[in-house]
Amino acid sequence: MELLDKLKILGAAAKYDVCAATGCGPGGSGRAAVPAPSGVCHSFLPDGRCVSLFKVLQTNECLKDCFYCPNRIQRDGPRTAFTPDELAGLFMEFYRRNYVEGLFLSSGISRNPSHTMEQIIKTAEILRYKHSYTGYIHLKILPGAGFEYVEQAVRLASRVSVNIEAPTTEHLQKLSRLKNFREEIIGRMKWVHGLQQGGSLPAGQTTQFIVGAAGESDSQIMKTTVSLYREIGMRRVYFSAFQPVAGTPLEERAPTPVLREHRLYQSDFLLRSYGFSLSDLSFDTGGNLPLDIDPKVNFAVHNLHLFPMEINRASYKELLKVPGIGPTSARRIVNARRNFRITSLDELKNIGVVVKRAVPFIQVNGKYRDSYKLVQQLELWRESHDYPLPDNPLILYEGSHAVQAP
Ligand code: SF4
Protein backbone atom coordinates (compact mmCIF):
# COMPACT_ATOMS: atom_id res chain seq x y z
CA MET A 1 0.00 0.00 0.00
CA GLU A 2 1.26 3.50 -0.83
CA LEU A 3 2.45 5.62 2.07
CA LEU A 4 -0.21 8.25 1.52
CA ASP A 5 -2.96 5.63 1.49
CA LYS A 6 -1.65 4.34 4.80
CA LEU A 7 -1.67 7.86 6.15
CA LYS A 8 -5.26 8.35 5.06
CA ILE A 9 -6.35 5.22 6.94
CA LEU A 10 -4.16 5.52 10.02
CA GLY A 11 -4.60 9.28 10.39
CA ALA A 12 -8.40 8.97 10.24
CA ALA A 13 -8.40 6.04 12.67
CA ALA A 14 -6.51 8.07 15.29
CA LYS A 15 -9.31 10.57 15.74
CA TYR A 16 -10.89 8.56 18.55
CA ASP A 17 -8.03 9.39 20.91
CA VAL A 18 -8.26 12.72 22.71
CA CYS A 19 -4.97 14.58 23.02
CA ALA A 20 -6.06 17.88 24.49
CA ALA A 21 -8.86 19.23 26.58
CA THR A 22 -10.57 22.56 26.87
CA GLY A 23 -9.82 22.55 23.22
CA CYS A 24 -12.33 23.52 20.66
CA GLY A 25 -13.63 22.19 17.49
CA PRO A 26 -14.72 24.25 14.58
CA GLY A 27 -16.39 27.33 15.85
CA GLY A 28 -15.01 26.96 19.35
CA SER A 29 -17.54 24.38 20.42
CA GLY A 30 -15.61 23.35 23.45
CA ARG A 31 -14.77 19.93 22.02
CA ALA A 32 -11.34 18.52 22.41
CA ALA A 33 -8.78 18.24 19.70
CA VAL A 34 -10.11 17.95 16.20
CA PRO A 35 -8.19 15.88 13.68
CA ALA A 36 -7.93 17.33 10.23
CA PRO A 37 -7.52 15.02 7.27
CA SER A 38 -4.10 13.43 6.80
CA GLY A 39 -3.35 13.04 10.49
CA VAL A 40 -2.78 16.69 11.39
CA CYS A 41 -4.69 17.56 14.53
CA HIS A 42 -5.13 21.06 15.86
CA SER A 43 -5.20 20.97 19.63
CA PHE A 44 -5.97 23.92 21.84
CA LEU A 45 -4.11 23.88 25.11
CA PRO A 46 -5.51 25.30 28.38
CA ASP A 47 -3.36 28.41 27.93
CA GLY A 48 -5.15 29.06 24.63
CA ARG A 49 -2.19 28.12 22.49
CA CYS A 50 -2.98 26.12 19.39
CA VAL A 51 -0.55 23.35 18.54
CA SER A 52 -0.58 21.09 15.51
CA LEU A 53 0.10 17.47 16.26
CA PHE A 54 0.72 14.68 13.82
CA LYS A 55 -1.84 12.27 15.23
CA VAL A 56 -1.67 8.81 13.81
CA LEU A 57 -1.79 5.08 14.53
CA GLN A 58 1.20 2.80 14.08
CA THR A 59 -1.34 0.20 12.94
CA ASN A 60 -5.11 -0.21 12.88
CA GLU A 61 -4.85 -3.99 13.18
CA CYS A 62 -6.10 -5.03 16.59
CA LEU A 63 -6.60 -8.20 18.59
CA LYS A 64 -9.02 -6.62 21.03
CA ASP A 65 -12.76 -6.39 20.78
CA CYS A 66 -13.67 -3.00 22.31
CA PHE A 67 -17.35 -2.69 21.46
CA TYR A 68 -17.20 0.99 20.49
CA CYS A 69 -14.03 0.87 18.42
CA PRO A 70 -13.80 0.91 14.62
CA ASN A 71 -10.49 -1.00 14.84
CA ARG A 72 -11.88 -3.96 16.82
CA ILE A 73 -10.89 -7.38 15.58
CA GLN A 74 -14.32 -8.40 14.29
CA ARG A 75 -14.91 -5.30 12.17
CA ASP A 76 -14.25 -5.42 8.46
CA GLY A 77 -12.25 -2.70 6.79
CA PRO A 78 -8.82 -2.05 5.34
CA ARG A 79 -5.98 -2.84 7.74
CA THR A 80 -2.51 -1.51 7.46
CA ALA A 81 0.57 -0.52 9.44
CA PHE A 82 3.49 1.88 9.16
CA THR A 83 6.98 0.54 9.57
CA PRO A 84 8.93 2.63 12.11
CA ASP A 85 11.10 4.05 9.30
CA GLU A 86 8.08 5.05 7.23
CA LEU A 87 6.34 6.75 10.11
CA ALA A 88 9.41 8.57 11.42
CA GLY A 89 10.27 9.74 7.89
CA LEU A 90 6.74 10.99 7.25
CA PHE A 91 6.62 12.84 10.55
CA MET A 92 9.97 14.55 9.90
CA GLU A 93 8.74 15.60 6.47
CA PHE A 94 5.69 17.25 8.05
CA TYR A 95 7.75 18.72 10.86
CA ARG A 96 10.37 20.28 8.58
CA ARG A 97 7.63 21.86 6.49
CA ASN A 98 6.13 23.32 9.67
CA TYR A 99 2.86 21.43 9.21
CA VAL A 100 3.11 19.96 12.72
CA GLU A 101 4.82 20.72 16.02
CA GLY A 102 4.66 17.33 17.67
CA LEU A 103 3.69 13.69 17.39
CA PHE A 104 0.79 11.83 19.02
CA LEU A 105 1.34 8.15 18.33
CA SER A 106 -1.30 5.60 19.24
CA SER A 107 -2.00 2.13 17.90
CA GLY A 108 -4.17 -0.93 17.72
CA ILE A 109 -2.60 -4.12 19.05
CA SER A 110 -1.24 -6.20 16.23
CA ARG A 111 -0.05 -9.76 17.08
CA ASN A 112 0.51 -8.92 20.77
CA PRO A 113 1.10 -5.79 22.89
CA SER A 114 4.88 -6.34 23.00
CA HIS A 115 5.22 -6.59 19.23
CA THR A 116 3.29 -3.37 18.64
CA MET A 117 5.03 -1.53 21.49
CA GLU A 118 8.32 -2.52 19.89
CA GLN A 119 7.23 -0.80 16.66
CA ILE A 120 6.13 2.30 18.56
CA ILE A 121 9.40 2.44 20.49
CA LYS A 122 11.45 1.98 17.30
CA THR A 123 9.60 4.87 15.67
CA ALA A 124 10.38 7.11 18.64
CA GLU A 125 14.02 5.99 18.72
CA ILE A 126 14.47 6.78 15.03
CA LEU A 127 13.09 10.25 15.66
CA ARG A 128 15.20 10.91 18.75
CA TYR A 129 18.50 9.30 17.68
CA LYS A 130 18.57 9.26 13.87
CA HIS A 131 16.79 12.57 13.21
CA SER A 132 17.85 14.21 16.52
CA TYR A 133 14.26 15.35 17.00
CA THR A 134 13.91 16.89 20.46
CA GLY A 135 10.29 18.08 20.28
CA TYR A 136 7.02 16.78 21.68
CA ILE A 137 6.19 13.07 21.44
CA HIS A 138 3.10 11.55 23.06
CA LEU A 139 3.23 7.75 23.05
CA LYS A 140 0.34 5.45 23.81
CA ILE A 141 1.11 2.61 26.21
CA LEU A 142 -0.91 -0.36 25.05
CA PRO A 143 -2.89 -2.32 27.63
CA GLY A 144 -0.83 -5.33 28.65
CA ALA A 145 2.50 -3.87 27.42
CA GLY A 146 5.57 -5.44 29.07
CA PHE A 147 7.55 -3.47 31.65
CA GLU A 148 10.62 -3.04 29.43
CA TYR A 149 8.50 -1.31 26.76
CA VAL A 150 6.80 0.95 29.27
CA GLU A 151 10.25 1.88 30.58
CA GLN A 152 11.54 2.73 27.11
CA ALA A 153 8.43 4.73 26.24
CA VAL A 154 8.82 6.79 29.42
CA ARG A 155 12.46 7.42 28.53
CA LEU A 156 11.73 8.55 24.97
CA ALA A 157 8.41 10.41 25.22
CA SER A 158 7.37 13.83 26.45
CA ARG A 159 4.05 12.34 27.55
CA VAL A 160 2.56 8.85 27.69
CA SER A 161 -1.00 7.66 28.18
CA VAL A 162 -2.88 4.46 28.90
CA ASN A 163 -6.58 4.82 28.11
CA ILE A 164 -8.76 3.83 31.05
CA GLU A 165 -12.04 4.05 29.04
CA ALA A 166 -14.34 3.25 32.00
CA PRO A 167 -14.32 3.96 35.75
CA THR A 168 -14.45 0.39 37.13
CA THR A 169 -13.78 -3.22 36.20
CA GLU A 170 -17.51 -3.84 35.86
CA HIS A 171 -17.96 -0.94 33.47
CA LEU A 172 -14.96 -1.91 31.36
CA GLN A 173 -16.41 -5.41 31.03
CA LYS A 174 -19.39 -3.82 29.29
CA LEU A 175 -17.00 -2.39 26.70
CA SER A 176 -14.62 -5.28 26.13
CA ARG A 177 -14.38 -8.96 26.96
CA LEU A 178 -10.62 -8.91 26.47
CA LYS A 179 -9.32 -5.95 28.47
CA ASN A 180 -8.28 -6.28 32.07
CA PHE A 181 -8.89 -3.15 34.13
CA ARG A 182 -6.70 -3.77 37.17
CA GLU A 183 -3.60 -5.27 35.60
CA GLU A 184 -3.47 -4.22 31.97
CA ILE A 185 -4.57 -0.64 32.56
CA ILE A 186 -4.21 0.51 36.19
CA GLY A 187 -1.13 -1.72 36.58
CA ARG A 188 0.61 -0.02 33.60
CA MET A 189 -0.34 3.42 34.89
CA LYS A 190 1.33 2.56 38.19
CA TRP A 191 4.47 1.45 36.39
CA VAL A 192 4.58 4.78 34.56
CA HIS A 193 4.07 6.62 37.84
CA GLY A 194 6.98 4.75 39.42
CA LEU A 195 9.26 5.30 36.41
CA GLN A 196 8.42 9.00 36.29
CA GLN A 197 9.94 9.61 39.70
CA GLY A 198 13.37 9.77 38.03
CA GLY A 199 12.43 13.08 36.40
CA SER A 200 11.67 11.82 32.88
CA LEU A 201 8.40 12.44 31.04
CA PRO A 202 8.17 16.24 31.24
CA ALA A 203 4.51 16.37 30.14
CA GLY A 204 3.50 13.57 32.49
CA GLN A 205 0.97 10.79 32.13
CA THR A 206 -2.62 11.20 30.90
CA THR A 207 -5.64 9.03 30.28
CA GLN A 208 -9.05 9.13 28.63
CA PHE A 209 -12.59 8.01 29.45
CA ILE A 210 -15.13 7.11 26.80
CA VAL A 211 -18.12 8.81 28.40
CA GLY A 212 -21.53 7.19 28.31
CA ALA A 213 -20.68 3.94 26.55
CA ALA A 214 -20.82 1.67 29.60
CA GLY A 215 -23.81 3.12 31.45
CA GLU A 216 -21.52 4.67 34.04
CA SER A 217 -22.51 7.79 35.96
CA ASP A 218 -20.59 11.05 36.19
CA SER A 219 -20.03 10.53 39.91
CA GLN A 220 -18.34 7.18 39.17
CA ILE A 221 -16.16 8.85 36.54
CA MET A 222 -15.23 11.71 38.88
CA LYS A 223 -14.50 9.34 41.77
CA THR A 224 -12.04 7.37 39.64
CA THR A 225 -10.63 10.62 38.26
CA VAL A 226 -9.85 11.84 41.78
CA SER A 227 -8.06 8.55 42.60
CA LEU A 228 -6.04 8.80 39.39
CA TYR A 229 -4.83 12.29 40.31
CA ARG A 230 -4.19 11.40 43.93
CA GLU A 231 -2.75 7.91 43.72
CA ILE A 232 -1.16 7.73 40.28
CA GLY A 233 -0.09 11.34 39.84
CA MET A 234 -2.05 11.61 36.58
CA ARG A 235 -1.29 14.94 34.86
CA ARG A 236 -4.60 15.16 33.01
CA VAL A 237 -7.72 13.11 32.56
CA TYR A 238 -9.59 13.55 29.27
CA PHE A 239 -13.23 12.82 28.58
CA SER A 240 -14.50 11.80 25.19
CA ALA A 241 -18.27 11.67 24.62
CA PHE A 242 -19.20 8.29 23.16
CA GLN A 243 -20.25 8.46 19.51
CA PRO A 244 -21.55 5.25 17.90
CA VAL A 245 -19.62 3.84 14.97
CA ALA A 246 -21.37 1.79 12.28
CA GLY A 247 -20.44 -1.88 12.27
CA THR A 248 -19.68 -2.05 16.00
CA PRO A 249 -21.83 -3.70 18.71
CA LEU A 250 -22.70 -0.26 20.09
CA GLU A 251 -23.80 1.21 16.76
CA GLU A 252 -27.40 1.50 17.94
CA ARG A 253 -26.54 3.24 21.20
CA ALA A 254 -27.44 6.91 21.41
CA PRO A 255 -24.48 9.27 21.28
CA THR A 256 -23.48 10.96 24.52
CA PRO A 257 -24.31 14.68 24.49
CA VAL A 258 -21.19 16.75 24.09
CA LEU A 259 -22.51 18.94 26.91
CA ARG A 260 -21.99 16.02 29.30
CA GLU A 261 -18.33 15.89 28.28
CA HIS A 262 -18.14 19.65 28.85
CA ARG A 263 -19.63 19.39 32.37
CA LEU A 264 -17.04 16.73 33.23
CA TYR A 265 -14.24 19.00 32.02
CA GLN A 266 -15.63 21.88 34.08
CA SER A 267 -15.82 19.67 37.18
CA ASP A 268 -12.33 18.33 36.56
CA PHE A 269 -11.09 21.90 36.34
CA LEU A 270 -12.74 22.74 39.68
CA LEU A 271 -10.96 19.78 41.28
CA ARG A 272 -7.56 20.57 39.81
CA SER A 273 -7.41 24.35 39.91
CA TYR A 274 -10.11 25.67 42.26
CA GLY A 275 -9.53 23.56 45.39
CA PHE A 276 -12.88 21.79 45.08
CA SER A 277 -13.27 18.28 46.44
CA LEU A 278 -15.49 15.51 45.14
CA SER A 279 -18.05 16.23 47.87
CA ASP A 280 -18.37 19.82 46.57
CA LEU A 281 -19.80 18.56 43.28
CA SER A 282 -23.57 18.11 43.10
CA PHE A 283 -24.93 15.17 41.16
CA ASP A 284 -28.56 14.40 40.35
CA THR A 285 -30.33 11.31 41.67
CA GLY A 286 -28.82 9.24 38.85
CA GLY A 287 -25.32 10.33 39.87
CA ASN A 288 -24.88 12.66 36.90
CA LEU A 289 -23.89 16.29 36.69
CA PRO A 290 -26.95 18.31 35.69
CA LEU A 291 -26.54 19.42 32.10
CA ASP A 292 -28.49 22.64 32.55
CA ILE A 293 -26.26 24.26 35.14
CA ASP A 294 -22.58 25.03 35.36
CA PRO A 295 -21.07 22.86 38.18
CA LYS A 296 -19.65 25.91 39.98
CA VAL A 297 -22.96 27.78 39.98
CA ASN A 298 -24.59 24.54 41.10
CA PHE A 299 -22.17 24.38 44.03
CA ALA A 300 -23.04 27.97 44.95
CA VAL A 301 -26.80 27.50 44.89
CA HIS A 302 -26.45 24.34 46.98
CA ASN A 303 -24.26 26.16 49.52
CA LEU A 304 -26.02 29.47 49.96
CA HIS A 305 -24.91 29.60 53.60
CA LEU A 306 -21.46 30.57 52.25
CA PHE A 307 -22.85 33.60 50.38
CA PRO A 308 -22.91 36.48 49.83
CA MET A 309 -19.17 36.60 50.24
CA GLU A 310 -17.64 39.94 51.15
CA ILE A 311 -14.95 40.52 48.56
CA ASN A 312 -12.83 42.55 51.00
CA ARG A 313 -12.77 39.79 53.63
CA ALA A 314 -12.89 36.44 51.83
CA SER A 315 -9.71 34.36 51.69
CA TYR A 316 -8.18 33.29 48.38
CA LYS A 317 -9.63 29.80 48.87
CA GLU A 318 -13.10 31.21 49.57
CA LEU A 319 -12.97 33.53 46.57
CA LEU A 320 -12.36 30.53 44.31
CA LYS A 321 -15.79 29.21 45.25
CA VAL A 322 -17.54 32.27 43.77
CA PRO A 323 -18.87 31.85 40.21
CA GLY A 324 -17.10 34.31 37.94
CA ILE A 325 -13.89 34.35 39.99
CA GLY A 326 -10.97 32.19 38.88
CA PRO A 327 -7.47 31.65 40.28
CA THR A 328 -6.05 34.71 38.49
CA SER A 329 -8.80 37.13 39.53
CA ALA A 330 -8.83 35.72 43.10
CA ARG A 331 -5.08 36.34 43.35
CA ARG A 332 -5.50 39.86 41.98
CA ILE A 333 -8.27 40.61 44.49
CA VAL A 334 -6.07 39.48 47.38
CA ASN A 335 -3.14 41.58 46.08
CA ALA A 336 -5.32 44.66 45.43
CA ARG A 337 -6.72 44.53 48.99
CA ARG A 338 -3.23 45.05 50.37
CA ASN A 339 -3.33 48.56 48.92
CA PHE A 340 -6.97 49.62 48.96
CA ARG A 341 -10.51 48.56 49.77
CA ILE A 342 -12.55 47.35 46.80
CA THR A 343 -15.75 49.36 46.62
CA SER A 344 -17.28 48.89 43.16
CA LEU A 345 -18.16 46.29 40.56
CA ASP A 346 -16.10 48.24 38.04
CA GLU A 347 -12.98 47.63 40.09
CA LEU A 348 -13.77 43.91 40.11
CA LYS A 349 -14.35 43.96 36.38
CA ASN A 350 -10.95 45.59 35.84
CA ILE A 351 -9.39 42.89 37.97
CA GLY A 352 -10.83 40.24 35.62
CA VAL A 353 -13.89 39.06 37.57
CA VAL A 354 -16.86 38.02 35.40
CA VAL A 355 -19.14 40.37 37.31
CA LYS A 356 -22.39 39.14 35.80
CA ARG A 357 -21.76 35.68 37.18
CA ALA A 358 -20.31 36.80 40.49
CA VAL A 359 -22.73 39.51 41.56
CA PRO A 360 -25.48 37.25 42.92
CA PHE A 361 -22.98 35.72 45.30
CA ILE A 362 -20.90 38.66 46.54
CA GLN A 363 -20.97 41.81 48.60
CA VAL A 364 -18.63 44.61 47.66
CA ASN A 365 -17.93 46.79 50.63
CA GLY A 366 -21.33 45.79 52.02
CA LYS A 367 -23.23 46.44 48.78
CA TYR A 368 -25.20 44.17 46.43
CA ARG A 369 -26.83 42.01 49.11
CA ASP A 370 -30.09 42.19 47.22
CA SER A 371 -28.73 40.13 44.38
CA TYR A 372 -28.08 37.40 46.89
CA LYS A 373 -31.62 37.49 48.19
CA LEU A 374 -32.87 37.05 44.66
CA VAL A 375 -30.74 33.95 44.27
CA GLN A 376 -32.15 32.60 47.52
CA GLN A 377 -35.67 33.15 46.28
CA LEU A 378 -34.74 31.62 42.99
CA GLU A 379 -33.40 28.54 44.73
CA LEU A 380 -36.56 28.17 46.82
CA TRP A 381 -38.56 28.57 43.69
CA ARG A 382 -36.43 26.02 41.88
CA GLU A 383 -36.91 23.49 44.68
CA SER A 384 -40.66 23.85 44.57
CA HIS A 385 -40.93 23.90 40.78
CA ASP A 386 -38.16 21.47 39.92
CA TYR A 387 -37.02 24.01 37.38
CA PRO A 388 -33.41 23.89 36.15
CA LEU A 389 -31.25 26.90 36.89
CA PRO A 390 -29.27 28.05 33.85
CA ASP A 391 -25.51 28.62 33.75
CA ASN A 392 -25.95 32.23 34.62
CA PRO A 393 -28.75 32.64 37.15
CA LEU A 394 -28.61 36.38 36.67
CA ILE A 395 -30.34 36.12 33.32
CA LEU A 396 -33.44 34.98 35.17
CA TYR A 397 -33.75 38.16 37.11
CA GLU A 398 -32.02 40.78 35.06
CA GLY A 399 -34.61 43.49 35.07
CA SER A 400 -37.51 43.21 37.47
CA HIS A 401 -39.30 40.09 36.24
CA ALA A 402 -36.77 37.47 36.99
CA VAL A 403 -38.06 35.63 39.99
CA GLN A 404 -41.41 35.16 38.40
CA ALA A 405 -39.77 33.24 35.57
CA PRO A 406 -41.72 30.23 34.29
S1 SF4 B 1 -7.47 -1.96 22.03
FE1 SF4 B 1 -9.67 -1.61 21.81
S2 SF4 B 1 -9.82 0.62 21.60
FE2 SF4 B 1 -7.67 0.09 21.17
S3 SF4 B 1 -7.60 -0.18 18.96
FE3 SF4 B 1 -7.97 -2.19 19.85
S4 SF4 B 1 -10.17 -2.46 19.81
FE4 SF4 B 1 -9.74 -0.29 19.54
Image: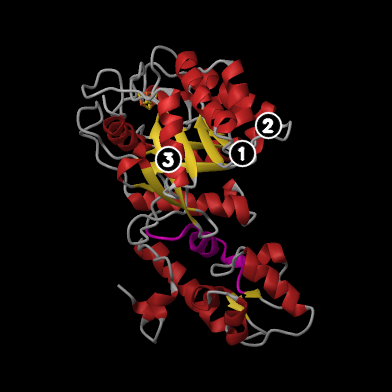
Residue type at the position of mark 2: Gln
Residue at the (23%, 24%) spot, across then down: 78
Farthest right residue? 338
Residue that mark 2 sits on: 196
Assess whether residue 307 is covered by the magenta stretch: yes
Label 2: how many residues lie within 10 Å, few (<14), some (14-19) or many (20+)?
Answer: some
Instruction: Specify start and end residues of the magenta stretch as a single range.
Output: 292-308
Residue that mark 1 sits on: 204
Precedes in sequence: disc 3 or disc 2? 3
Q: Position of residue 386 (x, y in %)?
A: 36, 61
Element type at mark 1 = loop
Whether the residue carrying mark 3 lies under 8 Å from ligand 1 is answered with no
Left or right: 214 in relation to 229: left
Q: How far apart are labels 3 and 2 at the CA level?
A: 31 Å
Q: How far apart are labels 1 and 2 at the CA level?
A: 8 Å
Q: Quadrant of ligand 1?
A: top left
Q: Nearer the viewer, residue 354 or 134?
A: 134
Q: CB of mark 1 within 8 Å of CB of mark 2?
A: yes
Residue type at the position of mark 1: Gly
Assess whether residue 363 is covered by the magenta stretch: no
Element type at mark 2 = helix
Residue that mark 3 sits on: 93
Label 1: how many residues lie within 10 Å, few (<14), some (14-19) or many (20+)?
Answer: many
**Vertical comparison of 266 with 226: above or below:** below
| Prevailing secondary structure class for the magenta stretch in the rendered image | helix
Residue at the (53%, 74%) spot, across then down: 354
Whether the residue carrying mark 2 lies under 8 Å from ligand 1 is answered with no
